[in-house]
Image (spheres, grey):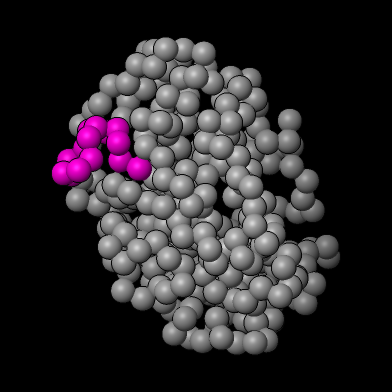
Amino acid sequence: KDEKWKNLVNLKFADYIEKDYFLENILHETEHDENCSCGNSKIEIIYHFGACSSTQETDASYLMENNFEYTKMLVHYCHQKKIKFIYASSAATYGDGENSYSDKSITNLKPLNMYGYSKQLFDVYAEKKGFFNDSNFKIIGLKFFNVFGPNENHKSEMRSMVNKAFYQIQENGKAKLFKSYKKGFTDGEQKRDFIYVKDATQIVYKLANNNNIKSGIYNVGTGKASSWNELAKAIFKAMDKTPKIEYIEMPEILRGKYQYFTQADMEKTLSAIDGYKFCSLEDAVKDYVQNYLILNKYLGE
């Protein structure tokens, strides 16, 4: 049933190692074969984007082990070997945004769910350990906002709304959005900073390849919030269908942990990469829907 392997078919890479085996290799300075660079100075950079990103996950111990402890072991290894470490934090750390969406400070943030808390814990841990201030070590934490795009079919309930709504519309002719339970937000007018995966990867690439960049936390969003209604209408347009939206009850488990508004402060990130021109939400949705979802294609095809 697991078809995640299809995400790799059209990509180029030298080797594949399961996460537990990889960790075992680097922690014990061993190599699984003569071509493996794990555990030695051949490694120049480690991108650590793997995590459980489910906002409905209630197993705190699992989240702590998978999202916090694993990342701690990786960062200590990278620090010891002076390997550049780029890891995924999350916009979920900002909670309801009462302390802004600025990446210039990670203190006083109040995540609304355990997933966001597990990410916040590591950001604070890295800061307290002095990793961000070590001139001999480069560490970059990326607070990803609402990323959508090809190769996300395996993410189950954590797939983007573009992916979910596309199949809803194909099957029933309508998209389902959560009702609002907060004063000031009508149904479907909750807003998020949606960023296309192609833009997100370009920003990551530029940050990773700027040798003058300072260690720290960087937002990865567009700096523009759009409503779920706007997103849904863009999906219908890309499918050449008349918009038909059904507003459904939000699961009880989410109601007190839901972000009604997110918008990345991109000043720090854009300054570090000398600016960037984002794809518009409508054009990004059109590319995803027409060139990937309708054709059932993956990145690289």
Please tell me whether residue 132 is drawn above or below residue 225 in the rendered image: below
Taking the magenta stretch, the answer to whether it contains residue 179 is yes
Name the residue: 16% across, 44% down.
183
Name the residue: 48% across, 86% down.
129
Per the rendered image, the range of residues in magenta is 178-191
Residue 70 position in % (x across, y down): 50, 68
Please tell me whether residue 78 is drawn above or below residue 17 in the rendered image: below
Q: Nearer the viewer, residue 66 or 224?
A: 224
Residue 127 position in % (x across, y down): 47, 81
Q: Which of 173 and 8 is in front in this view?
A: 173
> How many numbered marks have been drawn onto this rendered protein structure?
0
Q: Which quadrant would residue 215 be assigned to in this image?
A: bottom right
Residue 248 shows in this picture? yes
Name the residue: 28% across, 54% down.
58
Taking the magenta stretch, the answer to whether it contains residue 136 is no
Q: Which quadrant would residue 68 be assigned to in this image?
A: bottom left
Q: Main secondary structure of the magenta part?
A: loop
Residue 24 shows in this picture? no
Q: Nearer the viewer, residue 23 or 158?
A: 158
Position of 19 with respect to 244 (left or right) is right
Name the residue: 62% across, 71% down.
85
> On the rendered image, what quadrant is the C terminus found in?
top right
Residue 54 position in % (x across, y down): 38, 49
